[in-house]
Image (tube, grey):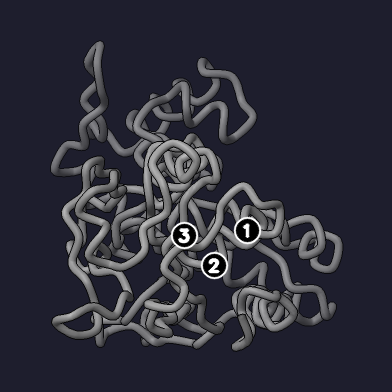
Amino acid sequence: MKTTLDELVAFSTVVETGSITAAAEQLAQTTSGVSRALSRLEAKLEVTLLLRTTRRLELTEEGEAFLAQARRILDSVEQAEEQMALRRQRPAGRLRVNAASPFMLHVVVPLVAGFRERYPQIELELHSSDQIIDLIEQRTDLAIRIGNLRDSTLHARPLGSSRLRVLTSPAYLARHGTPGSPEDLAEHSLLGFTQPESLNQWPLRHSLGDGLTITPAHKASSGETLRQLALAGEGLVCLSDFMTQGDRDRGDLVQVLTEDTVESRQPIHAVYYRNTALTSRITCFLDYLSAELAGQHWAQRGD
């Protein structure tokens, strides 16, 4: 075979990262080294795989066809390495995990050190997205989803649940007063999500029933952005305990309308495609995450 694995890795990484410079950084190589690997690969195949402009790289038709084959080859090599590691009882290889940025920052990141200490041969690759991604398109092994699942093509493993509360900062209450009922929220600054709109239905009991759809004064796509706005005293927000437990413990955020709040918990699942082989590194990560979440105060049924 004329083509080397290093050349396949260079080509695949350039496509995934979007530039030769980013690929070189990820591979811990020089930009010129990655560029030469691409040139050698194209010379061996006698085709142009990537169209290079000053602003971006674009796959040619031949490049798209070759990329699919290259990824299959690299995945096969990775699986072979995984099988050899299993023989030594040491799960190994790259594990690509995706989660919304608040869950990644507040839950996954604090657990990385302990996981790496237990499984040093597993290389974690963490990606954050506040939108639902296509696991295959993004080459993701598993994703953490918060809320009700809708995609039936995914296999899901429950990890727990997290309660929703209406919160704000003491500074905001000092300036604007404390709402005495859900109807009083019309006089307050409310912080909500750009999408989906279902996240702007707060678990509050009011004169028309349970669940109050609010009209946000300020919107954001990320729960972490809304948390920071609430901490800065910009208004009231409805967020999940997994990202606000520490804020409440410190008194930086306080719950309001407690008596009017309906018990509402967001389910948390790890998902992966049903036709995905459940490798040992995925199993190790899920088992570790499940055990750690079971010990988290916010994941318990109590207040």
Q: How packed is label 3: few (under 14 Cα within 10 Å), some, or many (20 or more)?
A: many
- Taking depth in this image into account, of 263 and 177 the one nearest to the observer is 177
Quick check: marks 2 and 1 in contact, CB under 8 Å? yes
Three-letter amino acid code at the position of disc 3: Asn
Residue 156 is drawn in which quadrant? Answer: bottom left
Residue 135 relative to residue 21: left or right = left
Q: Secondary structure at mark 3?
A: strand
What amino acid type should be assigned to the residue bearing mark 2?
Asp
Within 10 angstroms of label 1, few (less than 14), some, or many (20 or more) residues? Answer: some
Q: Earlier in the sequence, mark 2 or mark 1?
A: 2
Picture coordinates of residue 201 (x, y %)? 24, 69
Which residue shows up at 48% across the image and 68% down it? 141
From this view, report whether residue 225 is shown above or below residue 303.
above
Which is nearer the eye, 143 or 81? 143
Q: Residues within 10 Å of mark 2 (few under 14, many from 20)?
A: many
Depth order, front residue of 230/152: 230
Q: Is residue 231 visible?
A: yes
Image location (x, y in percent) of residue 289: 66, 75
Residue found 22% across the figure and 65% down from its top? 183
Screen quadrant of the C terminus: bottom right
Task: Find numbered disc 2 in the image and state the secondary structure of the residue it sits on.
Answer: helix
Location of mark 1 (residue): 248
Give the foreground label among 1 and 3. 1
* Image side of residue 242 versus residue 176, left or right: right
Q: Is residue 2 visible?
A: no
Q: Which residue is mark 2?
A: 241
- For the residues marked 2 and 1, what is the alpha-carbon distance in whole angstroms? 9 Å
Residue for badge 3: 98
